[in-house]
Amino acid sequence: MHLRTLPLIAAVAAFGASALSGQAAPRRRVFPVPILGYAPETSLLFGVGLVGVVSADTSGPATRPSTALLTAIYTLKRQYQVELTLDRWTAGDSWHAAADVVVERYPSLFHGIGVGATDTSEVYTPRRYSLTASAQRRVSGRVFAGAGYSIQHSRMAGIEPGGRLSAGSVPGSRGGTEAMLTVDGVWDTRDVLYRTQRGGYLRVGYGVAGHALGGDHTYRRYTADARAYRNVGGAVVIAGQAILDATDGTVPFYLLPHLGGSGILRGFTQPRFIDGAMSAAQLEARAPLKGVVSWVVFVGAGAVAPSVRGLADAQLRAAGGGGIRLLLDKKEGLQLRLDYAVAKGGGGFYVAAGDAF
């Protein structure tokens, strides 16, 4: 979640400190997260997030925690956003299942696609319903293989008259239904799922969208996400990430690979730069500060282009910043993330559960 102007969440700090004052985490815990912010396209927004954690039974084989995140936001312009994210691990990490459900009528910004993007933007407001579900099976050691399916229906509830989307020539500018089937492989040696100290992660995926799956457009998607973590000096963790996201075919503009947002190149609004392909790299330094509070500094760079071949010559965008982490669950390491990032022509606050990567 990106609150570009005024996030007020001091209550969370008080909650986290009182909840973790020397008490052992129970097997199931739920954390409320108040949300308050402002943006020109939304006016005042407010809501609540609920983070739930289910710890593994320590008498059995090592198992990662299962989590649930529910957020509900409403704005003074009668816009809303409700999202439920579930992440489930079975005993011994033999299976991993995830699901995400979103219902929203929420504004976003369109700057244009690729070299046609400009610093000026237009606001569009989709009414959107989406469902994503996936499952992965551990096949050997820390190697997983799986598949997933996603479907999303959008209807444009608001478009600026005379804007680039109003003509209807941009794929997706009239809304529609998109569906995709994905397969992926994952290699994961991270020591823990949250507050990772050491290890590596690699996910390679392939997706196909088309009429046979229930969608309006036909295209393919190729993704690769590599991460590495190293503990230096006993307290500081250096984390790095490299991402490639590429498509071919007719892709709705709101599903194109992008730079910007709370996960990739914080400092630019989401999605600030979009095109047929995207590559990016990020680096973070993380260290404890005092009690349940930790500090983070980060920097990142990335580019978009019509295809993977064009990325080498594309303009490189950079952003960076810092933030703090509030430890919500001492046993599992689940944190609340508060970041401020700056970039050329951008900048803003970000509030989310867990690290960016």
Image (cartoon, rainbow, N blue to C red):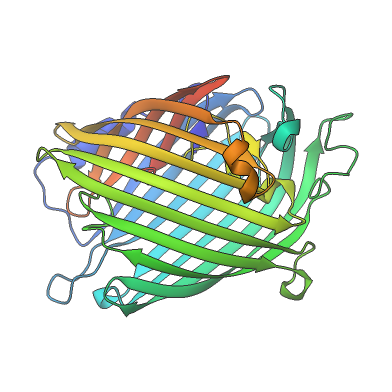
Which of the 4 quarters of the picture holds residue 124? top right
Whether residue 263 is visible to the viewer of this picture, yes or no, is no
Q: Percent x, y for residue 175?
A: 79, 51
Q: Is residue 317 left or right of residue 295?
A: right
Q: Is residue 129 placed above or below 169 in the rendered structure? A: below
**For residue 345, above or below residue 206:** above
Q: Residue furthest top?
A: 345
Q: Please, is residue 103 above or below residue 45 in the view?
A: below
Residue placed most toward the observer, 191 or 328: 191
Q: Residue furthest bottom?
A: 139
Residue 242 percent location from the top left of the image: 43, 47
> Is residue 129 shown left or right of residue 339?
right
- In the figure, residue 323 lies in which quadrant? top left
Is residue 319 or residue 80 the one in the foreground? 319
Q: Position of residue 231 (x, y in %)?
A: 17, 44
Q: Is residue 217 left or right of residue 23?
A: right
Answer yes or no: is residue 356 visible: yes
- Viewed as shown, does residue 148 lie left or right of 34? right
Q: Quadrant of residue 115?
A: top right
| Residue in the picture at 66% in, 49% down | 307
The answer to whether residue 344 is above or below residue 13 is above
Closer to the camera in the image, 74 or 7? 7
Number of marks in the rendered image: 0
- Residue shown at the point (35%, 31%) measured from the top left: 298
Point 61% across, 66% down: residue: 207
Which x, y percent locates residue 345? Answer: 58, 19
Rendered residue at 40%/67% (across/down): 186
